[in-house]
Image (cartoon, grey):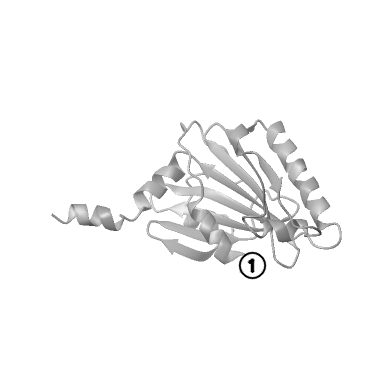
Amino acid sequence: MRHLTMLCILLLGLAFSLPSPAAERIFGLSWQATPAQLRARGMHLTLRKTDGRLSMYETRQVPRTLSDADTYLLVFDRDAGLVKIIMVSRNFTGAHASDEARKRFEQLDALLRERGYSALANQQVKQLKPRAGQDFFVCLSMPSCGTWKSAYRKGHVLVSMQLRGLPDGAGFLVMNFEEQPQFAQALAKNRKPTAAEKDAQAF
């Protein structure tokens, strides 16, 4: 799958600790749902990665989708069910790719704020350090060159949005939705002990 290797890293993305009020549906999906429950609703899910108690499924079919979405990755905890949703957009390509991508980023930023999501001030980063003549997305493909991301909070749901670049000059947008504290708790339970922790437990 396109971007799968990189996106699997997002499974261990930033974790926040917040209270968890009543559940809110994202893309028409219910937090804490299981793969079996979603399949019973007619969704086609393909298992892409398993890591201990966490599993990641791919789907191109959700009840309510963004107009330019390409793929959705759904992360489930063995006990807590659905705890994270990742949306990957179609690629931005062509001569005006960077302008179109930044415009779409601002559109989604405005939509999230309109829906009651509060931007996290310390998580708004839009900076580039390109060499002369270097393409926007080529720069974003290198961590040392640039970052274009933002984060938001609404109740128990945390959202991160980021433009990512590819070496060929194309790019895409990724949105992560996490249910908290369930996702943070799932990561903590899934964390493997370090060598030092294993040694300390040996005696």
User: Splitting the image into 4 quarters, where does residue 149 fall?
Assistant: top right
Residue 2, position as x, y percentages in the image: 64, 67
SS state under label 1: loop
Classed neighbour count for the residue bearing mark 1: other residues with Cα under 10 Å, few (<14), some (14–19), many (≥20) = few
Pick the residue in front: 31 or 115. 115
Using the image, determine if residue 170 lies above or below residue 87. below
Residue 193, position as x, y percentages in the image: 30, 54
Left or right of 85 in this view: 138: right
Left or right of 82 in this view: 28: right
Give the residue furthest to the front. Answer: 132
Give the residue furthest to the right. Answer: 95
Which of the image's four quarters has the C terminus? bottom left
Residue 58, position as x, y percentages in the image: 57, 61
Pick the residue in front: 18 or 82. 18
**Is any atom of residue 89 visible in this view?**
no
* Residue underneath mark 1: 2
Q: Residue at x 26, y 54 (%)?
A: 196
**Is any atom of residue 124 visible in this view?**
yes
Q: Residue at x 41, y 49 (%)?
A: 187
